[in-house]
Image (spheres, rainbow, N blue to C red):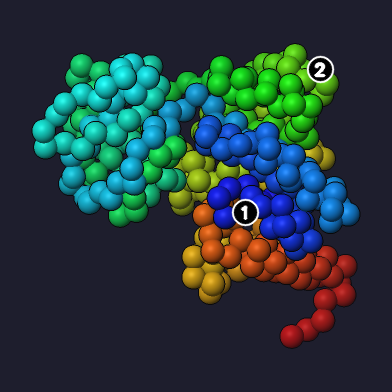
Amino acid sequence: MATLGPTMEKPEDLEQAVLAGVGWFRLPCGYRQRPHVENARTARAAAQAAGQSVHLLLDLPSSRPRTGTMPELNVKPGDPIVFWDAESSADAPTLSGHTLVPLPGLLELLPQISPGHRMWFCDGRLNFVVDRVTEGLVFTHLQAGTIPLKSSNSLFLPDSASGFTAITPPDRALLEAFAAAGVVPDWVALSLIAGPEDVIESRATLQEVFGCKVQVMAKFETVAAVERAAAIIAVADGAMVARGDLGLAVGYANLPAVQDELVAAVRAAGKPVVVATQIMESFAATGIPQRAELSDLSLIARQRADVIMLGKETVFSPRPLECIRLAREVLTRETRRFEQASHGTQRPL
């Protein structure tokens, strides 16, 4: 599964991606400014030109806040940052000695944020700690992280029991735009769900908007979802092990076991399962595959996941097609090797 984005949106690139092994295209709907309907049309046209079919998946972001429109911000540990709700006021507050970051939707979460709580962005690679909350503003400092904070970076609150809405009003407006354009996705992925109720309610919304069945993919990203995995898998059409937020939620040391258990459970239910996040990001950036990346691909093949999802590897990358080709080569080799081993036909080294 390749994610559509700035470095892979042109028709010729998408056609080459299909020929290189892409069977799914993901549209990251949390990036509201992107032309998702047009990109969906382009992806299907590219697949048709390549003589193949693809699955089109809309990945909805849930009601979790994302940073608003802002210049790229380089932050150092200890730097004071103030988050404010850009939806509550057209003008940013005036503060000296602090950098202001817009975070639309923050006001709804304020009752659940307290001093000492952590605010994580970019899969935990930016870790802010709350110093105080006052007058609708959250005063923080960066505890750890060196990458820039950018527009549309999503927030994760590891210390807060935050409830999220699977399909928000902006999500519904986007779905209705797809329906009006006559573009029906094959799949819709739901972020940060907590239980089967989220899947059932979202399925009803999709039926209402499109007038036909659209398959629902449950994303496992929270402890609550893992605890109710069996019930969620029973009502969903497929599942995604979304390791970015899931690793933050369950703890990195627990993530391998949780991934293994979830993949096995979804496969046992006879439904497709996707493993996602940070599979080949080092190779995407440098062109040199890390041994850990190759081992990760091998593990995913051994677990018999149906799909891997490439995110930044195809969205913000100088070599999206190379990532696709290498992933396909390793997965094909490793899948064949494990199948031969299971049948006792594997050749010795």
Up/down of 213 relative to 240, above or below: above
Residue in the picture at 73% in, 69% down: 329
Which amino acid type corresponds to the residue marked 1 in the rendered image? Met
Q: Is residue 215 above or below residue 287?
A: above
Q: Seen in the image, is 256 located left or right of residue 75?
A: right
How many marks can you see? 2
Of 291 and 12, the residue lying toward us = 12
Answer above or below: position of 33 versus 198: below
Horizontally, is 268 left or right of 30 in the view?
A: right
Q: Which residue is mark 2?
A: 211
Q: Residues within 10 Å of mark 2 (few under 14, many from 20)?
A: few
Disc 1 secondary structure class: loop
How would you rate the neighbour count of disc 1 (Cα within 10 Å): few for under 14, some for 14-19, many for 20 or more? many
Q: Secondary structure at mark 2?
A: loop
Q: Position of residue 62 (x, y in %)?
A: 54, 27
Q: Residue furthest left?
A: 96
Can residue 195 be seen in this snapshot? no
Residue 230: image location, x then y, percent: 69, 31
| Residue 135 seen by the camera | yes
Q: Which residue is mark 1?
A: 8
Asked if labels 1 and 2 touch by Cβ distance under 8 angstroms, the answer is no
Q: From the viewer's side, name the closer residue of 251 and 142.
A: 142
